[in-house]
Amino acid sequence: MKRKHIAKIPRRTYTPPPTLAAAPWDQGASGPANQDGLIVQERGETDLTTGKVINPNRVFGKVRMPMVNRYHRQGKLTDHHLAAAQRLYAAYAGYPTRDPIAAITDRVDGAGDSDPNVMLLDKRREFYAIWKAIPQRCKPILEHVVLNDLAMGEMVGASNPETAAEYWGKLTEGLEAVK
């Protein structure tokens, strides 16, 4: 029996899909807009005796600078304003739930050790004491800039120079009320 000859099917030659060269303006996450406000910090453990950072592997990391620190660097806020904003934020950060009833109902044991719940309760009380001293008209600005860490320019009407000056006045007035 004679075999039938099967014709070979011509194969297509492989052509790689077309690729585009990276655009010179597209820098992704390493672009200048994303690097704005980042601080390069050394990562490592702090030596308790000397207070220096021990970093044998030379590991560095980046942390975003808070808006109040930026405004202080630009000369828009004084040292007193910066310290007041940092104190307000530290008290706020110790109180993430914003529930005033929880501060009253927290139970504390009498062991004498430093209890995290006691520290949290103290932070809540401190935040409410500071917040109560701030004038009501200044609270939205302080909440926006200090507590939420957003730029003043993102507030409604901040593009108007008169409104922006009013916002800056309220921010400084509110920070001066923090004792």
Image (spheres, helix red, strand yellow):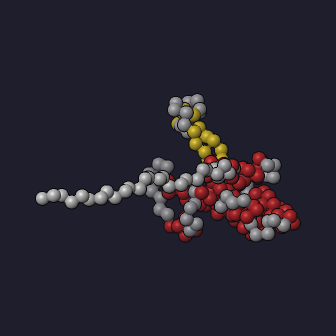
135 or 32: which is nearer to us?
A: 32
Side of 123 relative to 134 (left or right): left
132 or 52: which is nearer to us?
A: 52
Side of 155 relative to 124 (left or right): right
Residue at 44% across / 52% down in the picture? Answer: 14
Residue at 62% across / 59% down in the picture? Answer: 92
Residue at 49% across / 63% down in the picture? Answer: 106
Query: Is any part of residue 173 visible from this angle?
Result: no
Side of 162 relative to 109 (left or right): right
Task: Name the quadrant of the C terminus.
Answer: bottom right
Which quadrant of the structure image shows residue 158?
bottom right
The location of residue 86, given as percent across then percent down, is 68, 52
Query: Is any part of residue 60 visible from this angle?
Result: yes
The location of residue 164, given as percent across then percent down, is 82, 64
Residue at 67% across / 58% down in the picture? Answer: 149
Side of 149 relative to 50 (left or right): right
The location of residue 22, given as percent across then percent down, is 61, 50
The location of residue 130, given as percent across then percent down, is 69, 60
